[in-house]
């Protein structure tokens, strides 16, 4: 999968409106990877608003795979438990690069 396709998948995911009850989107599934990618006034993201036209940074959480070491060290709230933690304020381009590395 190419970088542009990964970024488009994330952008489309974030374009989905959040649910009314809890301001969360369903898990993002990319090939065989599954993770939470969230952005709203209640998440660690920029801008911190609901349903923005675009987001510079997002909240990533609870991936069902291991991100590259550089990504874990830079963003994980709990680097000792990389699949059971939140990754706050992750720039979209860094997330795209990390997912690309996992997929290739």
Image: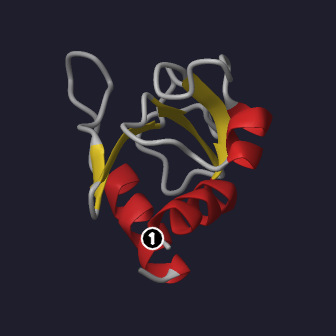
Q: Image height check: is 32 above or below 104?
A: above
- In this view of the protein, can residue 44 be seen by the observer? no
What residue did someone put label 1 on? Answer: 6
Q: Nearer the viewer, residue 3 or 49?
A: 3
Q: x, y percentage for residue 36?
A: 38, 36
Can you tell which quarter of the image residue 25 is in?
Answer: top left
Q: x, y percentage for residue 22?
A: 27, 17
Q: x, y percentage for residue 28?
A: 31, 48
Q: Residue at x 39, y 51 (%)?
A: 14
Q: Is residue 94 left or right of residue 9?
A: right
Q: x, y percentage for residue 50?
A: 44, 34
Q: Which image quarter holds the N terminus?
A: bottom left
Q: Is residue 12 left or right of residue 69?
A: left
Answer few, some or many: residues within 10 Å of disc 1's Cα (few below 14, many 20 plus, some between 14 and 19).
many
Q: Nearer the viewer, residue 32 or 11?
A: 32
Q: Residue at x 68, y 23 (%)?
A: 79
Q: Residue at x 37, y 40 (%)?
A: 35
């Amino acid at each position: 999968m190419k970088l542009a396709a990964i970024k488009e998948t994330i952008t489309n995911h974030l374009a989905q409106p959040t649910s009314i009850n809890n301001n969360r989107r369903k898990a993002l599934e990319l090939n065989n990877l599954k993770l939470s990618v969230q952005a709203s006034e209640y998440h660690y993201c920029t801008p911190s608003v609901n349903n923005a036209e675009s987001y510079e940074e997002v909240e990533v959480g609870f991936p069902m795979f291991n991100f590259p070491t550089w990504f874990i060290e830079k963003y994980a709230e709990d680097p000792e438990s990389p699949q059971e933690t939140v990754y706050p304020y992750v720039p979209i381009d860094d997330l795209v690069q990390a997912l690309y590395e996992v997929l290739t």
